[in-house]
Image (tube, helix red, strand yellow):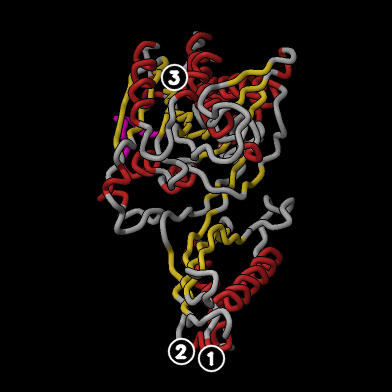
Amino acid sequence: MREFTDALCRVRTTAGREAELTDRLRARLDSLDFETYAWAADAERLAGHPSFPSDLDPSACVGRESVAGVLEFGDPDAGPTLVLNGHTDVVPAGGEWETDPFEPVRRDDGAASERLTCRGAVDMKSGLAACVGAALDVREAATELDGRLVVEAVAGEEDGGFGAATAAMENPYPFERTAAIVAEPTGLTPVVACEGSLMARLELTGRSAHAATPWYGEDVLPRFERIRRAFAELEAERGTRVSHPLYGEYDRPWPVVAGRVAAGDWPSTVPAELEAEFRIGVAPGETVTEVQAAFEKRLAAVVAEDEWLVANPPRFERFSVQFEPSEIDPDEPVVRTLREAMAATGVGRREPRGATYGTDARHYVAAGIPTVLFGPGSVRAAHFPNETIEWQSVRRARETLAATAERFLRSGAS
């Protein structure tokens, strides 16, 4: 599994570059006697999905191929089908890295503390490798089971779920899926609720003037600060008012972040234009649309107090991909079975929790497929320079996923 994971990590699968790894994975799964299926993302189809913009550029789907391997047991139609899912894409390797981000580095201070460092080590090629290993372990055990195990390697999760959304809308298999486990980095904890996010762009227009006589201009920056403060206040209000039993541990359960701000065009000129892009948290049980309406209402209150903004109203609208929230009942059979397997393997914190990030789980949940997150590593290390995972957690994830799959197929998922 070390060699397999390292090989996955060496392929630079940033946005739109997943196809090479998909081809390699299909060949590897074929060689391991999985029955393989592959599918591509379709722009026309995805444009009708709420996560994606209605004017989705077809070029965004180029290179976004996904693959799955299926193992059948006993009478496969007499038992359930469990999907073990991972995504192949990674975010760009920015920041200060101590090593080549696409050359896996292993540090071994003893078997229990071996660590893997590279882009994708945590998010989430180690988790994907654990899924493949777990499926092989179930087959190797040669127990009497009925049903199917599917290992999916999907493309474009970081950009909204190109592969998973396609598979959820248009089943690529000639059989139904009973439940799924997505091996995102959860610290070996079951996650049954995922936060959504509104991606919204704010545009402000002021009036330029020479910096020596700024009183003749209309500066956009103080106005942006008033809007940003108003949004921060609304975030704090929502943190108290919008409650969820699985999010009590978070001080900011539905965070609001202005991740990109650009203003002005010359240091000696009053800035007359500003563009800011926000990521706004959406709680499970809410919709992106109603959260957008709440922030539009708060923006309107700021505008009403400024004559310039009344005459030159800001634009505030969605852009890019939206992440809808999702959750399942912690009593779902797949969650119960996972927790039983965790108890048997002595792994992790077994109490289900919620996560403040979005995942591909939402696509399967929306399609009626109960989906829980469980995987090695911590999300705190994801998207960071020197992304590192403790290898022992990958081994334990594989063991627990195998135990879950065996129990799930044996139980008939009742």
Real-space Cα distance between discs 1 and 3? 70 Å
Task: Give amino acid for label 2.
Answer: Ala
Instruction: Identify the residue position indicated by label 1 in the image.
Output: 307
Real-space Cα distance between discs 1 and 2? 6 Å
Task: Give amino acid for label 3.
Answer: Asp
Above or below residue 241? Residue 372 is: above
Q: Which residues are magenta?
A: 170-178
Residues at marks 1 and 2 touching, judged by CB atoms closer than 8 Å: yes
Q: Residues within 10 Å of mark 2 (few under 14, many from 20)?
A: few
Instruction: Identify the residue position indicated by label 2 in the image.
Output: 311
Residue at 70%, 34% (x, y): give it: 350
Q: Position of residue 118 (x, y in %)?
A: 57, 27
Quadrant housing residue 97:
top right
Above or below residue 379? Residue 77 is: above
In this rendering, the label closer to the viewer, 3 or 2: 2
Mark 1 and mark 3 lie on one chain; the one further toward the N terminus is 3
Mark linked to residue 146? 3
Does residue 172 show up magenta in the picture? yes
Above or below residue 67? Residue 406 is: above
Magenta stretch, overall SS: loop
The one nearer the camera, 305 or 360, is 305
Residue 201 visible in image:
yes
